[in-house]
Amino acid sequence: LADQPYPAEKPRYELVFVANGRALIQDEDGLWVVQRGSRLPDSSKVVKIEKRGGKWVLVNSNDATIEMTH
């Protein structure tokens, strides 16, 4: 039997705002401004910040997509 992958741990931050190629994220410690290449609270990096289907998303190097929550 092939190994069944477990679901990836969800990032512990949320996407709050996007402007000029930068994103504002929030975690339990506060607010942070990030851009492509920035290290994130889960030790991944920002790969891209883009609009998908009318919503802003942040894609990290763990291949997780975080949608704007507000």
Image (cartoon, rainbow, N blue to C red):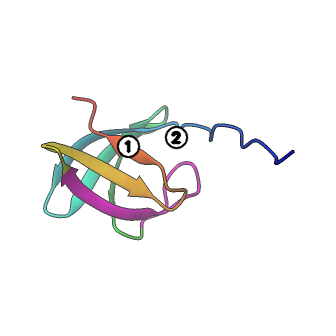
Q: Are marks 1 and 2 in contact (CB under 8 Å)?
A: yes
Q: Quadrant of residue 9?
A: top right
Is 41 a magenta residue?
Answer: yes
Q: Which residue corresponds to mark 1?
A: 66
Q: Quadrant of residue 17?
A: top left
The residue that appears at 49% across and 31% down in the rendered structure is: 28
Instruction: Tell me the number on the disc at residue 11.
Output: 2
Mark 1: amino acid:
Ile
Mark 2: amino acid:
Pro
Residue 55, x across and y down, in percent: 18, 42
Residue 14, x across and y down, in percent: 38, 37
Left-right relation of 35 to 22: right
Left-right relation of 31 to 45: left
In the image, the segment drawn in magenta is 38-51
The residue that appears at 50% across and 56% down in the rendered structure is: 63
Say what secondary structure mark 2 lies in.
loop
Q: Quadrant of the N terminus?
A: top right
- Image vertical order of residue 37 relative to residue 6, above or below: below
Mark 2 burial class by Cα count in 10 Å: few <14, some 14-19, many 20+: some
The residue that appears at 33% across and 63% down in the rendered structure is: 48
Residue 3, x across and y down, in percent: 81, 46
